[in-house]
Amino acid sequence: MHPDDDIDQKLPPQQSASHSTDGASSERLTGRHRSAISTPRGLRAVLGTAGLRVALATGVTCCLGVTAVALAATRETDEGPRPQVAEAVADRALIVEDGAASRSLERSSPSPTPPASPSPSVSPSAKPSATPKPKKTTAKPTQPARPKPVAGLTQAQMDNAKVIVDVGVDMKIPRKGLVVAIATAMQESTLLNYASGVLPESQNYAHQAIGWDHDSVGLFQQRPSSGWGTVRDLMRPAYAARAFYEALLQVPGWQEMSVTLAAQAVQISAFPYAYAQHEERASTIVAALLS
């Protein structure tokens, strides 16, 4: 057939009207006003135009409902889980935490931390202690060296001889007077400090021997009854030596006398010449003590 044939180009009136109507509907549904839901021709034929509009409205309503439900779910998610879900999550966290702690204890136990030593409390008003000053130590007086015994004397005898010489030197007695005193003490007491068995009191003081010649006591065997002094004084070697020197100084010309006569002038002994035997040793003792 040819395209310009009149018979083929014409359509029946009903068919033409229907086509135009469908064409108009088709134009309204195309372009930017066309619905997202395409309707098949058979459905348009059954429902007609009004039914089609109702169907379209119903579809839009359903889409809006689905959108609202999705928004509500999103809002619920944004606001956080529901109370039941939060409690379940908290319980799960506790279970996990307890389990982790138990495993941690099983793997290793922490070493105990030693207790910290308490720091000494310092009172704010306490003042720092001052540095203690060193105590002054009083030096003990040094004892003079004991003289070395000479002329066959013991240490005790030499000590007594030193006392006699020291007292004479202090009184500025000449050297001969020192020899007279040592020789006299060697004869009377052998240079030992005697107490008397007749005078019990004399034994209460320091002594080195006991004699029985009346009440004679000390290095020079001086008698308290003759006025030489008290028992207590005469038992002291220094006092007895001073008493002897004072009596010697009262003898006129004693320095020109022999040692034995000078001694006898002071002692008035029954054996006046006994002192001479000790002169040489006495001189040796004095020389040793004066050196």
Image (cartoon, rainbow, N blue to C red):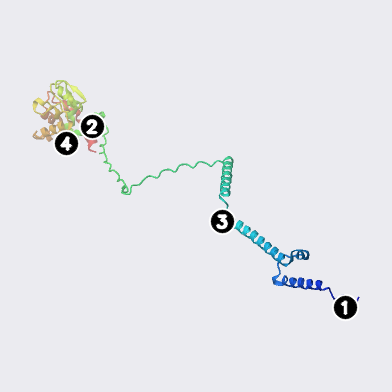
Pointer 3 or 2: first along the chain? 3
- Residue 211, percent across and down? 17, 22
Earlier-in-chain disc, 1 versus 2: 1
Q: Position of residue 167 (x, y in %)?
A: 17, 36
- Classed neighbour count for the residue bearing mark 4: other residues with Cα under 10 Å, few (<14), some (14–19), many (≥20): many
**Number of residues whose C-alpha sits closer than 10 Å to that of mark 3, classed few (under 14), some (14–19) or many (20 or more):** few
* Mark 1, secondary structure of its residue: helix
Q: Nearer the viewer, residue 132 or 150?
A: 132
Q: Which residue corresponds to mark 4?
A: 168
The amino acid sitting under disc 3 is Glu
Cα distance in 3D space between marks 1 and 3: 73 Å
- Residue marked by disc 1: 6
The quadrant of the picture occupied by the N terminus is bottom right
Q: Above or below — where is 59 with respect to 284?
A: below
Q: Residue tagged by mark 2?
A: 159
Sequence-first tag of 1 and 3: 1
Q: Position of residue 144 (x, y in %)?
A: 25, 37
Of labels 2 and 4, earlier in sequence is: 2
Point out which mark residue 79 bears. 3
Name the front one of labels 1 and 3. 1
Residue 205 placed where, x, y %? Answer: 18, 27
